[in-house]
Image (cartoon, grey):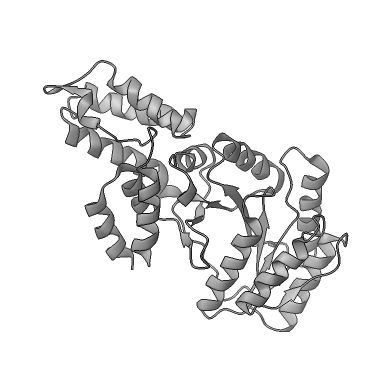
Amino acid sequence: MTDNWFSKVRAKLNQGDSFLTRDLGTLFSGDTLDDDALELLEERLLLADAGVEATGTLIATLSSEIHHGRVRNEGQLREALRKALLEILLPVSTPLDIPPFIKPFIVFVVGVNGAGKTTTIGKLAHRYKSQGRKVMLAAGDTFRAAAVQQLTTWAERTGTPISAQGEGADSASVIFDAVQAARSRQLDVVIADTAGRLHTQGHLMEELRKIKRVLQKHDPYAPHEVLLVVDGTTGGNALVQAVQFHEAVGLTGLVITKLDGTAKGGIVLAIAKRLALPIRYVGVGEGIDDLRPFDARQYVDALMNTPEIGRASCRERV
């Protein structure tokens, strides 16, 4: 199963001119790097949506390695680049831990419309139920027409109870009722949907803060996880969303969807470098099992097209 998601991401990232490590050997003249080698790598990183901060850090690291004579050929450059990528991504490769002594554990899911928020919630419910946890969904997106029905469809598909009211109902009330019901039924996890909103819509961002305040009147630590779902194909917009949602509601983790739909992939680096928030899951397909915990080593192997290392890494993680 893990090999499958790794191969999906690698296959997509190895398409197009944005592929990071394509033809690294051409950057050398004999045993020395061409003068424009780092400039070309910098261009590739920026084209791959890695962002200015992550790109600057990577290029500075490689420049230092070259200056000190530790990079003299393609193999050394590839290894130095891989190490530098892992230094950015390993700290955010942190799975979501749901402690058994918090019941219910409340997962608050936010994001803009179209990022895959409702689908992610359904896949999370499936994942947690398959781990033996008792889950409830809260249909807190009462703003968008058909949102409740879409989440209800996922509840039916996964066999998960759902707390819902009609369109236009108070989101805080819906989510609070779900938490109370889950508590009385001794359920393990509540996954709360919220209205999809642009990070620029101040009144809707305030509604998110209101929901948090209502929950914290009864549990000062709730919600226990605030997940932002971003679309991995939207490039720099995903970074802007992450920054502004974090400022508004205090994110504790990220889900990056549709990584099977982009030939770039650098947005993961941009978000990791800018926010240093845990990347909990990545979406790599439309199947119900295609939401996977983020693994930095596997992702770097995909980004750099290192199948031998990737397969070994996958076996270690099974």
Q: Is residue 186 left or right of residue 74?
A: right
Asked if residue 139 shows in the view, the reply is no
Q: Position of residue 114 (x, y in %)?
A: 66, 50
Q: Is residue 317 left or right of residue 118?
A: left
Q: Position of residue 91 (x, y in %)?
A: 43, 48
Q: Is residue 42 left or right of residue 205?
A: left
Residue extending farthest to the bottom is 185
Residue extending farthest to the front is 16
Would you place residue 304 above or below residue 104 in this image? above
Would you place residue 133 above or below residue 276 in this image? below
Q: Quadrant of residue 149?
A: bottom right
For the C terminus, which image quadrant?
bottom left
Asked if residue 52 shows in the view, the reply is yes
Q: Is residue 14 left or right of residue 256?
A: left
Residue ID at (62%, 36%): 240
Q: Position of residue 37 (x, y in %)?
A: 28, 22
Would you place residue 95 above or below residue 13 in this image? below
Residue ID at (56%, 34%): 236
Residue extending farthest to the top is 35
Q: How many marks?
A: 0
94 or 51: which is nearer to us?
A: 51
203 or 112: which is nearer to us?
A: 112
Residue ID at (58%, 41%): 238
Q: Position of residue 34 (x, y in %)?
A: 22, 18
For the N terminus, which image quadrant?
bottom left
